[in-house]
Amino acid sequence: MLLNDVVATSSVVSATRSRLAKVDALADLLRRAGDQVRAVVAFLAGTPLQGRIGAGWRTLVKLRETPADQPALTVAEVDRTFDEVAETSGKGSTTRRAELLSALFGTATKDEQDFLLRLLTGELRQGALEGIMLDAIAKAAEVDKGTVRRAFMLSGQLPDTAAAALTGGAAALDTFGLQLGRPIRPMLASPAENLEEALAGGPCVVEYKLDGARIQVHKDGDDVHVYTRTLREITAAVPELVELVRNLPARQVVLDGETLALTDDGRPRPFQETMSRFGATTETELLLHPYFFDCVHLDGTDLIDAPLRERNVALHKAVGDLVIPGVLEPSQEEADGVLADALRHGHEGVVVKTLDSVYQAGRRGKSWRKVKPVHTLDLVVLAAEWGHGRRTGSLSNLHLGARDPDGGPPVMVGKTFKGLTDELLAWQTSEFPKYEDHRDDWTVYLKPHLVVEIALDGVQVSSRYDGGVALRFARVVRYRPDKEPPEADTIDTVRAMLPEGGA
């Protein structure tokens, strides 16, 4: 398959807001991809199969090869070159990588050069997000969407899921199982307006919603691995968690939970302090404490498809006192008490989980509902305006976007400069230019890289922004280095916050 076929499909996908049109275009490409389907899916998802190939931004932006007149470069050739670049190391490796990439870019057309540059710098945003791609895989392979999504949850890799579906259909997808040491996509909670609404889903467990960082832990004997919500391994950075899990009574276990740094009186430290440990390369005195809320494998038995009621029994057996605080099948009064206790101890609120729910990646309807007294949204930073008065010289007023669930660019829903401390202003001013797309006299516009948590009093109908809604009294809570733009809240979530009858 020619790289030009991928580039052309990428252009079609980014040019339409129709979900069906995106799925159709991607499915048609996947049917024609043959044995290059893994590389094709990886390119469209914005990350080569090789991950970061060791070529830095400075090397890439210096590539000024004259583009080819006609497309002739194949996907296989690009993939092989990426392999060579990734495998190049040692003395002279920088020069050799530049030579390999220069040769590659010299055989690419102008459009292909642009695509490759954006792919290698992590800036490819053509709209082929997970949900769209999964639907396209299902359509191309003529298999059930649920089967594709389950295989993706268990494999954690879109290219592997696509290759299995296109070569072996449903039977191949069914071979994916939970594998110790291979992280699975996490299940997420959807927001609920209040606790009473969340409890209406039937028998449930109500648990603290901690102001911590999501972790997934795999143990096989003494072999322990710890992963973030984005499936990045952080085992080496959290030795205290590894030792604690290694000493659990279970021989084999896969746990889902949160971890956070605590003060001497047991209250959570600022979220940024917890996240700082995830990037650490040396041991630190700031210790993390884990709280586990799900168990999807225990001593040879997979529990992915078991109801939460059974997984909760296995969880208590596996981790004992490390279970997150909560109450099983509470009355309204007991649930109110859990929420009050969580807030009193400095946490965000509670999560209500129905006991008959199985473990499924992503937000799955009303199986898990989060209840917080303060409305917050995780939004993408689209731009920042230069400040005035005391903030002159600082990038201040943020332009905020919600994720388009159909894979388009983020949809602007508001602006805010409230909640920005002097420290954050300084950080924004130094950090934002790294993601600059373009600027004018007043504003620096950013490529979609940064996610920020925004507190708000509500949402109102507005014609000012493309999404038809605007945030009310928005203020910055914190940046979310543990999240990427595809994990931001959607425009549908924002619109759902409109007062009844206000849509």
Image (cartoon, rainbow, N blue to C red):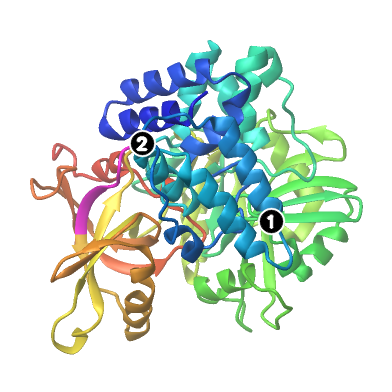
Residue drawn at (40%, 55%) of the image: 64
The one nearer the camera, 391 or 308, is 391
Residue drawn at (77%, 42%) of the image: 314
* Residue 424, position as x, y percentages in the image: 36, 78
* Residue 183, position as x, y percentages in the image: 69, 44
- Magenta range is 407-414
Q: Which residue is mark 2?
A: 407
- Residue 16, quarter of the rendered image: top left
In the image as oriented, which residue stretches furthest toward the left?
A: 463
* Residue 123, position as x, y percentages in the image: 41, 51
Q: Residues within 10 Å of mark 2 (few under 14, many from 20)?
A: many
Tell me whether the residue at label 1 lies in contact with that at label 2, contact meaning CB atoms closer than 8 angstroms: no
Q: Which residue is mark 1?
A: 233
Sooner in the amino-acid sequence: mark 1 or mark 2: 1
Name the amino acid, label 2. Answer: Gly
* Residue 404, position as x, y percentages in the image: 32, 40
Q: How many numbered marks does the figure carry?
A: 2
Look at the image and tell me in which quarter the C terminus lies: top left
| SS at mark 2 in the image | loop
Residue 487 visible in this rendered orientation of the protein:
no
